[in-house]
Image (cartoon, rainbow, N blue to C red):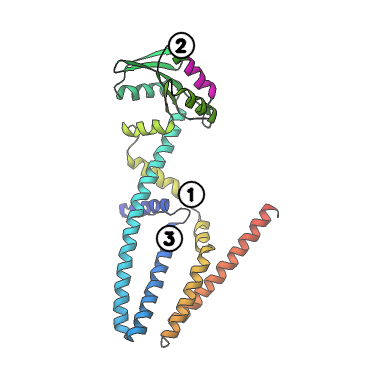
């Protein structure tokens, strides 16, 4: 069971690094490329030496080397995909949690972050605004908790700048679970040469959450990823990958290659049958893409 689970996870992580393609389609392509390469090597060596045994021996060496390269490549993609997918899932989890926080919980989290960074005398000065000290320098904090999809507006920045100016405070922090809109950023750029205002948005808060290890263990996210991917399984993805328009050239090239090999190795009809198989795949692929285009046009009402 553990081995099967590990295999499932491996597929999920590799798929994260190969875009819209599926693991099955990607591995099938690698096998096809390996087969084509071996056929080319075999045909070349056989035509040069006329020795079937020697040709098979060299081809087998190429097969082993290419298999090893594929394994190293898949291991690298798995490692990269694991890092990317876990980080993305953690960030989605964090964003959902922080959006679900009420304002009191959100402000308590911000206080925790500043205390952990050795800021002192954290105290409230007005609603959603606080002061802290670091190395004898006082700074103000403005906390803006918004609904998902909303952005920090120019007025929020303007009011905070006015507060800092009135109190003669030269450094401030605007902390939000969202982002600043363009107008707010423009105002911030205008005043930053006089007052140093740092923005801690959802990305910076996520980095701090990772730094202080506030998220569940990785095993939680592994299970979450696997459950979500299993719920999204779609057989059409396999079909669309197998008969993608990009595969037409590959299938056509393979058909021509095996036909040439059948002429070189005239005593063996297997390459010829394989050539016919790829011709059939090419035809099916072309018809499938034509059918898809017609259906797409109908759906758009063209």
Callout count:
3
State how far apart marks 1 and 2 are (Cα): 55 Å
- Give percent across and percent down for residue 1: 32, 53
- Give percent across and percent down for residue 236: 53, 57
Residue 57 forms part of the magenta stretch = no
Question: What label does residue 166 carry, if any?
Answer: 2
Residue ranking furthest to the bottom:
267
Residue ranking furthest to the front:
193
Q: Residue at x 33, y 42 (%)?
A: 219
SS for callout 1: loop
Question: What label does residue 232 carry, if any?
Answer: 1
State how far apart marks 2 and 3 are (Cα): 62 Å
User: Is there CB contact under 8 Å for labels 3 and 1?
Assistant: no
Tell me if mark 1 has few (under 14), some (14-19) or many (20+) residues whose alpha carbon lies within 10 angstroms of its own: few
- Give percent across and percent down for residue 70: 34, 62
- Give percent across and percent down for residue 255: 49, 75
Of 2 and 190, which appears nearest the observer?
A: 190
SS for callout 3: helix
Of 240 and 45, which appears nearest the observer?
A: 45
Of 119 and 4, which appears nearest the observer?
A: 119
Question: What label does residue 10 carry, if any?
Answer: none
Q: Which badge, 3 or 1, comes first in the chain's sequence?
A: 3
Which residues lie in the magenta part? 154-162
Question: What label does residue 26 carry, if any?
Answer: 3
């Amino acid at each position: 069971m553990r081995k099967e689970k590990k295999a499932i996870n491996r597929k999920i992580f590799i798929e994260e690094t190969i875009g819209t393609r599926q693991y099955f389609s990607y591995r099938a392509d690698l096998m096809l490329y390996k087969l084509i390469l071996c056929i080319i090597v075999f045909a070349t060596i056989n035509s040069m030496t006329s020795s079937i045994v020697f040709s098979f021996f060299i081809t087998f060496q190429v097969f082993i080397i290419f298999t090893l390269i594929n394994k190293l490549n898949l291991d690298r993609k798995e490692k990269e995909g694991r890092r990317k997918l876990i980080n993305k899932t953690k960030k989605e989890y964090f964003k959902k949690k922080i959006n679900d926080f009420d304002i009191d919980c959100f402000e308590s989290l911000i206080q925790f972050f500043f205390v952990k960074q050795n800021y002192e005398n954290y105290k409230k000065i007005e609603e959603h605004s606080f002061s802290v000290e670091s190395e004898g320098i006082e700074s103000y904090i403005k906390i803006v908790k918004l609904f998902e999809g909303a952005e920090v507006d120019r007025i929020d920045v303007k009011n905070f700048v006015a507060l800092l100016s009135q109190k003669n405070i030269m450094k401030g922090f605007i902390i939000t679970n969202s982002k600043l809109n363009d107008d707010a950023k423009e105002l911030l750029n205008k005043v930053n040469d006089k007052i140093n205002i740092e923005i801690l948005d959802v990305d910076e808060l996520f980095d701090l959450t990772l730094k202080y290890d506030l998220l569940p263990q990785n095993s939680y996210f592994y299970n979450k990823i696997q459950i979500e991917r299993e719920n999204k399984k779609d057989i059409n993805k396999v079909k669309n990958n197998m008969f993608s328009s990009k595969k037409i050239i590959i299938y056509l090239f393979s058909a021509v290659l095996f036909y040439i090999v059948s002429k070189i190795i005239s005593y063996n009809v297997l390459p010829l049958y394989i050539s016919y198989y790829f011709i059939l795949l090419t035809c099916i692929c072309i018809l499938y893409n034509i059918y898809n285009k017609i259906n797409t046009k109908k759906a758009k009402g063209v």
